Image (cartoon, grey):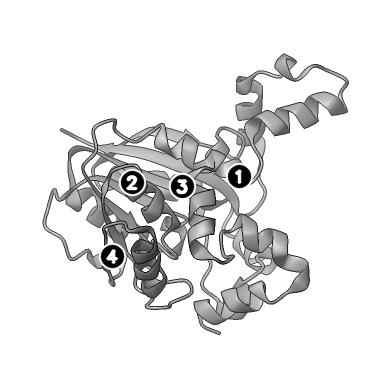
Amino acid sequence: MTWEESVQWLRDQPDQKELVKAAFYDDPLIEAAERYAGSSEWIAVRAFLPVQKGAVLDIGAGRGIASFALAKDGWDVTALEPDNSNLVGAGAIRGLAQKASLDIEVVQEWGESLPFADATFKVVHCRQVLHHARDLKKLCSEINRVLQPGGTMIATREHVISRKEDLATFLKLHPLHHLYGGENAYLLNEYVQAIVGAGMQIEHVFNPLASDINLYPTTLKLVKSELAHRFGLPSWFIPDVAMRLKGALNNAPGRLYTFVGRKSD
């Protein structure tokens, strides 16, 4: 199946409505985008974006939910999405931008060959994108090239494995990989080496329990509350550092990490 056909199949499954909504694959798209823009995930992402707005490139923009949130926040948004689908690709983004009366430029191209001049963007945003890279080092090199000096790269919700042998387990568990075959995951140090090797400095690496970005649709507060309840403790008794330690020990195949980097001045 194509990616569009796979997502449509998921949307048609009566028992997957919760996953569809959590992944923002539901319609009307503008309502899904508004929900994302108000989500705990986006609020956490926004905290790492520069205060002064400018040009931002949203790579692998999909249906355009992050492009929508960025444009709504006042950024000058270019959405990069190779798929032309009206459900999960460039067509969907254009329709969303028109419906919301937002100025979002849509470019259909792959991230490994960005059709932009050097130092074009103040921010490059990637939501669930790096693990799809055909060439991770090339993609990170292109991100670094189009970033302005001092610019920010944020790559969220990237799938991580501990051993190469874990990839098969992750792919088997993924709800859509068996349909379209497009999923992947890298070792943590492969992401780090690709980002640093491209010329960026890594400012933050968030493990599965270190940020609401990776935890959505749940939150760090809720996870702490549930853990505290299990052990008969008040939620404030569990510090964030304990959650980060627990997250670092997580070795589940495909667990989510987020990376924030900066191009040298």
**Residue annotated with mark 1:** 216
Q: Nearest the camera: 189 or 246? A: 246
Number of the label disc, if any, that sits on residue 112? 4
- Tag 1: Cα neighbours inside 10 Å, few (<14), some, or many (≥20)? some
Disc 3, SS: strand
Disc 4, SS: helix
Number of the label disc, if any, that sits on residue 65? none
Number of the label disc, if any, that sits on residue 156? 3
Confirm or deny contact between disc 3 and disc 1 (CB under 8 A): no
Confirm or deny contact between disc 4 and disc 2 (CB under 8 A): no
- Tag 3: Cα neighbours inside 10 Å, few (<14), some, or many (≥20)? many
Label 3 vs label 2, nearer the camera: 3
Number of the label disc, if any, that sits on residue 195? 2
**Which of the two discs, 3 and 1, labels the residue nearer the N terminus?**
3
Give the residue type at disc 3: Thr
Q: CA distance from mark 3 to mark 1?
A: 11 Å
- Tag 4: Cα neighbours inside 10 Å, few (<14), some, or many (≥20)? some
Q: Quadrant of the C terminus?
A: top left
Disc 1, SS: loop
**Which of the two discs, 4 and 1, labels the residue nearer the N terminus?**
4
Q: CA distance from mark 2 to mark 1?
A: 24 Å
Q: Measuring 53% from the left and 67% from the top, which residue is drawn there?
A: 183
Give the residue type at disc 2: Ile
